[in-house]
Each structure stands twice: as C-alpha cells, then as structure tokens.
Image (cartoon, rainbow, N blue to C red):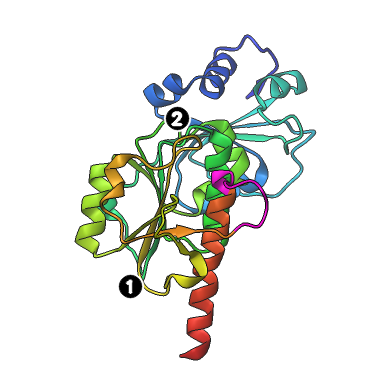
Amino acid sequence: MYIESNKNPKIKNLVKLLEKSKERKSQRKFIVEGKNENFFALKNGFVPIEFYIQPHIFQDSITLPSSAIKYEVSQSVYDKIAYRKQSEGILGVYEYKTYELDQIKLPDRPFILIIESIEKPGNLGAICRSADAFGVDMVVVCEEKADLYNPNVLRSSVGSFFNIPIISTNNANIYDFLIKMDVPIYATYMTETSKIIQNVDFTESAAVIFGTEHSGISDFWKDKIKENILIPMKGQIDSLNVSNAVAIVCYEVERQKIMLNKHL
C-alpha cells in the first residue's frame, strides 16, 4: 500500500505516537526509526506491527518479518513522520515489551545499573549505549520520569536500547530484588567516606545507583548502600553529566573484570 497524504489517519496516529507519551502508553506502541535500530529491535524479540518505508531512501536488504504490514510512503509523508531528518528511510511501529524482575536471568556476578528519576531522555539513551558497550547485565529505571520509549531515548541509544533488559519499577521493588539476589549496592554521592572507584572491588556482584541530574539519589537509598564511590577529577568543576558518570563507572567495572580474568 502506498501512502502519499499527510492527512492519512495512520500518518496522523504516527505523529501522535512520536509526540505524546500518553499516546504511546495508552496504545502500547512506539516508533523505531533507522536501519540499525530496527535491526536490533527485531534481533532482540521486539514485536513489529507495521513498517513505513520511503523507497527512494531505503535501499537496504534488511529482512522484515512477513507478519508486519508494510507501507510505502511519499517523501513528504516520510518528512512528516521521521523524527531524524537524516535517517535511512525506514520506520517501524512496535508493541511495548515489558521486562519483569523475576523473569531476568542474570549471570553469577551481575553488574546492574540503577537510574533513579532521570528526567532527560537523551541522557537515558546515552546511558543505554554505555551499558551495552561495557556489558551491563540490566538497567533499572526507578521512579520513572523520562518515558522509556521517548524517541530521544531510542535515538541517543543508537539501537543499544534493544540490546539489554531495561526495567521500569519503583525503589522498593528493586531494593527487595537486590537483597534477594545478594547484590551489594553502591551509590555515587559525595561523603567524607567516599572511595575512589579504582579502590573499590567490582569483580563480584554489584549494583550502582545514579540519581537525578539536579539532586542526586533520594533519601530512600542513603542508608541501604554498601559504599559510596567517587570519580576523581582534577578540574574546578565537581560534578559530571549523569551519562558521562555512568560511562566512566561502567568502564572501570569492565576493566577490573578483564584484569581479574587475565590472572585466573
């Protein structure tokens, strides 16, 4: 089927899904734009409903499942529905995929990221990218403020969003889970007893919690952590963007595990 009018009801609904979190949540659908992003979504078991393709732009051999409806759209329609103006001419609509804590199979020494009340979708997407790059086993978003399926999350993650389990829950649920799994909790707020990350042993199980961009972690966590960790800095500024801090900590955890394996 070929769609050439921006007034087509399906195109109008796509715009709603792009722009409004309440529409995504009520319809339990979200949009994936770009070749690599759709490839990773399909590879990791996300269920597609339909695809919208601009045939003059999309010149690739990605295999699309026969179960999903495929539409070709005009250039003007694609310009209307494309969140990224320089994408590859393919846009997929997928069902929400919900992970539950008790369904996740973790390795013997898991590394878990806990992101509390994050507000900026771009930061969450960048965190997913670092988590994927450094082998994080699970990302948990607590007290969700940034919609997990916001287009900015998916775009900033460059497809990494689909490669790791990402769970939205509340503080109490993930805390109970960590206690049950015997995973120690580390935090990233500054105290007199904070330890430099290189001096903390991350070769065993670990969950590291990062707080909001403005106020850090909530009081809920402050009496539940094993240790505070500190990223050493030489400049005059005393804080980092949360996605940068996550990347540094993820790198250090992976570095320690690599060094451990070399000595085994």
Secondary structure mainly formed by the magenta segment = loop
- Looking at the image, which residue is at 72% across and 35% down? 89
Q: Is residue 129 left or right of residue 108?
A: right
Furthest-right residue in view? 56
Q: Is residue 227 left or right of residue 214?
A: left
Q: Horizontal and vertical percent for residue 46? A: 46, 45
Residue 176 sits inside the magenta stretch: no
Furthest-top residue in view? 7
Vertical side of 114 occupied by 123: above or below: above
Q: Horizontal and vertical percent for residue 61? A: 70, 50
Q: Pointers 2 and 1 in contact (CB under 8 A)?
A: no
Magenta segment, which residues? 233-243
The image quadrant of residue 185 is bottom left
Q: Horizontal and vertical percent for residue 34? A: 66, 40
Q: Is residue 204 left or right of residue 39?
A: left
Q: Is residue 171 left or right of residue 209?
A: left
Q: Amino acid at mark 1?
A: Asp
- Looking at the image, which residue is at 49% across and 65% down? 197
Q: Residues within 10 Å of mark 2 (few under 14, many from 20)?
A: some
The answer to whether residue 73 of the structure is visible from this angle is yes
Furthest-front residue in view? 192
Q: Nearer the viewer, residue 167 or 241?
A: 241
Q: Amino acid at mark 2?
A: Lys
Q: Nearer the viewer, mark 2 or mark 1?
A: 1
Q: Which mark is residue 29?
A: 2
Return the residue at label 1.
108
